[in-house]
Image (cartoon, rainbow, N blue to C red):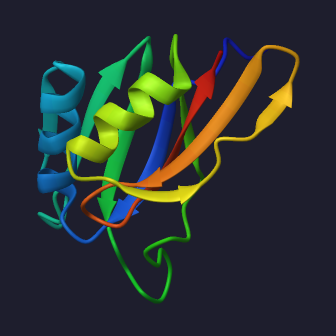
Amino acid sequence: MSTGVRTVMTFAVGPEASARWWGRFLDVPVKLDAGDAGAGYAGVEAGGVEVGFHPVDDGRNPLGGSPVVYWGVDDVGRVRDRLLAAGCEHHRGPPAVGPGRRIAQLRDPFGTVFGTEGP
């Protein structure tokens, strides 16, 4: 029935700014959609999964109330260092979570917590 995860939506104070930052970091195009109310959904796609940024709504979709997106990477430590140099902040990790597998969580410049997962 399921073909896998297609889209993960997070909530951001600045959806377009968030998507543009991630687009530059991942070197992928940015999708912009004003939506019915002109609210400003934006997203990027990498590895067949779209990560979307929806405007924060304190009543329904508060900042930080979104899922944690984990990007698959080939070297958690190297990518973590690159993300920190690009303006992210440490959130937690990187602990080992299984044989040959580690994760790290960071906060992007717009407040969204995300993770990296890999060797």
Is 57 left, or right, of 26 in this rendering? right
Q: Quarter of the image containing the N terminus?
A: top right
Count up the numbered dots: 0
Image x and y of residue 95, in percent = 74, 41
Furthest residue in direction bottom, as rendered: 59
Image x and y of residue 11, in percent = 39, 63
Q: Which residue is drawn at 24% across and 23% down?
A: 26
Furthest residue in direction right, as rendered: 99
Between 47 and 58, the one nearer to me in the picture: 47
Q: Quarter of the image containing the C terminus?
A: top right
Q: Residue at x 25, y 72 (%)?
A: 13
Image x and y of residue 75, in percent = 52, 16
Figure quadrant of residue 52: top left
62 is higher (above) or lower (below) than 34? below
Image x and y of residue 55, in percent = 28, 67
Q: Which residue is drawn at 23% across and 43% down?
A: 85
